[in-house]
Image (spheres, rainbow, N blue to C red):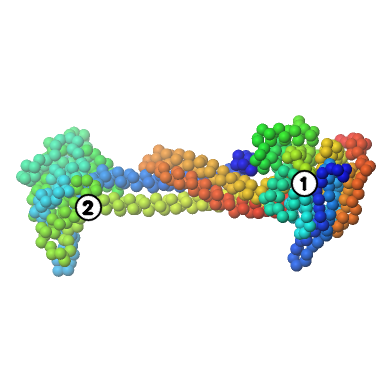
Amino acid sequence: MNLTNLFKIAFKALSNNKMRCFLTMLGIIIGVASVITMLAIGQGSKESIRAQISEMGSNMIMIMPGADMRGGVRQSAEDMQTLKMADYEAIRSKCDHVVGVSPNVSSSGQYVNGNNNYPSSINGVTSDYLDIRRLTVADGNVFTDRDVKSAAKVCIIGQTIVDELFPGGDSPIGKVIRFDKLPLTVVGVLEAKGYNSMGQDQDDIVLAPYTTVMKRVLAIDYIQGIICSATSEEYTDVAIDEITDVLRSNHKLKASDDDDFRIHSQQELSNMLSSTSDMMTTLLACIAGISLLVGGIGIMNIMYVSVTERTREIGLRMSIGARGIDILSQFLIESVIISITGGIIGIIMGCTAAFVVKGILNWPIAIQGYSVILSFFVCTLTGVFFGWYPAKKASNLDPIEALRYE
Amino acid sequence: MADKKEIIRLENIRRYFKVGNEEVHALRGVSFSIRDGEFVTIMGTSGSGKSTLLNLLGCLDTPTSGEYYLDGVAVRTMGKNDRARLRNRKIGFVFQNYNLLPKTTALENVELPLLYNSNVSARERERRAIEALEQVGLHDRMYHKSNQMSGGQQQRVAIARALVNNPVLILADEATGNLDTRTSYSILVLFQKLHRMGRTIIFVTHNPDLSQFSSRNIVLRDGKIVSDEVNTNIRSAQEVFDSLPPEED
């Protein structure tokens, strides 16, 4: 008995029952299509989060004051004063794997320009901040080092601030806006970045020299945080170690003391976000996998019924010389044909559905090569696995009994 | 006659079945041999053991004791797969209810046994199937599906299917049982024609009338042979068929 003949027999048997064959396939089609679509959506959102994070600067490191206890009461980060300008200077001069450093002090308040006003915050930074956060000036200039030294009343504003304060459309460069009572001259406008994956408006931003914010707005001599960037993403951990050493020696901490600062890297955020979306992807894949399983059980069910229904045919085939293995192969091939055909249709439909989701809902999608290959193999396995039992049952029939079956 | 090759030899065949705690003796020592070119009817009422004998002759079953040689091969000790192969090469079955594959053309139905024989190429398979259909007079209905044919035509397809592997033995089980008188005789005519062409045919039936058309008649009762007679005066089924009143509408 050669394979070509077996396939011929199986095809013939399937084509005699097209409708049933199609309905059985439907389970597999839906299962595979949903696996592929779900994974494409899950992976797409993960990749878009990754892309946004790296746009924000994947090598970014944030240092915040921390673990400051006053009489056993832990203080909020705003009130902690463990980070000083000396720390900033030390990181800038001593850390080899840190390229850009900027202090970060911020305050919130109301911006006013003529009739328009808008609540936002002000960030006191150095010009390094723009490189660290991958911000670029679309119009005008960055404030200079001299501006920083002299605590000049200048600022760079994001697109949202432009839209809110200059609704008329005239250029804000050179105009003076007020932050609460402090007049600031706009020297530059940042390129628009849109919303990030957490829904924050990245254009709702005002940058000013940190000296201006420290002296003229907050009147403080400590800094609220330091933001810096490692030479590259993979050196982030090295840079963090260097910063930790520098800060600990600057703060004269003993080996037994806890750090009085906290360091966050963008990597942590990235890991956290991608683990969240991984979980979602897994969940979606599980749901889709269950539907594939149900599809497989559908095959088993139909094949089982088919074996009972075709008992006489099996008896006849045996009486004219089909061996048990021939019958087994025939039914197995039938179920594998159903599952593979269903799988292929499912893959096509899954990809189509993913593109439809992309087109209509504008969700980011990424069709996974591995999910296509995997679902194809799962389909084949499903066919063999769920086809095996009915096929075995068919091949074990006694030809005498089977021929007499009514 | 005696110089012809022995196709079948049964030596004291016994077949017992266990039904619950009781042992049913379906065949209690059956011995006979059939030579090439014989047309044998095996007769018996229900319970006589003729179905059991048919299953044994068709290699679908093996005897509890005794030896069965088909074309010189001992069947009793053969495994399931070897017997399947033997059926495929040496036996052609014709059933009472035709057992054709539904929604399948006559040609494909006839090709079926050859599909299980990997020595036969696709071209050879088709050629032999067409040849077999010509022998049963259905060459103009090759592409008709089995459910578009009358009972008689279906039985002819089944006979063609039994012929296609060029078997040493054609085994018919009540082959005319489901047909009206007229069609029954037309099928008998066909069997007689095949007999004249030199085919060995065993026709199992409960209908005593059929014995006059075969060359030999074996009667079974309670698992034993009660008579085994050669029929020298074979009646022509064609004559009977011609004498039947034409079909009324």
The residue lying toward the viewer, choosing from A32 and A125, is: A32
Q: Residue at x 18, y 33 (%)?
A: A170
Residue B197 placement (x, y as % from top left) = 83, 36
Residue B214 location, quadrant: top right
Q: Looking at the picture, which amino acid does disc 1 mark?
A: Asp
The correct choice, above or below, for A50 with respect to A174 in the image is below
Q: Which secondary structure lies at badge 1?
A: loop
In the visual, does A43 lie left or right of A376? left
Q: Report the quarter where the N terminus of chain A lies.
A: top right
Tag 1, which chain?
Answer: B
Q: Which secondary structure lies at badge 2?
A: helix
Query: Which mark is drawn over residue B71?
Result: 1
Residue B130 location, quadrant: top right
Residue B212 location, quadrant: top right
The residue lying toward the viewer, choosing from A74 and A186, is: A74
Q: Residue at x 49, y 48 (%)?
A: A378
Q: Residue at x 63, y 49 (%)?
A: A325
Q: Looking at the picture, which amino acid does disc 2 mark?
A: Asp
Residue that mark 2 sits on? A237
Residue B45 placement (x, y as % from top left) = 86, 54
In the visual, does A249 lie left or right of A312? left
Q: Residue at x 58, y 47 (%)?
A: A335
Q: Residues within 10 Å of mark 1 (few under 14, many from 20)?
A: some
In the visual, does B68 lie left or right of B120? right
Q: Outermost residue, front direction? A: B3
Residue A394 placement (x, y as % from top left) = 65, 51
Of labels 1 and 2, the one closer to you: 1
Q: Outermost residue, bottom direction? A: A71
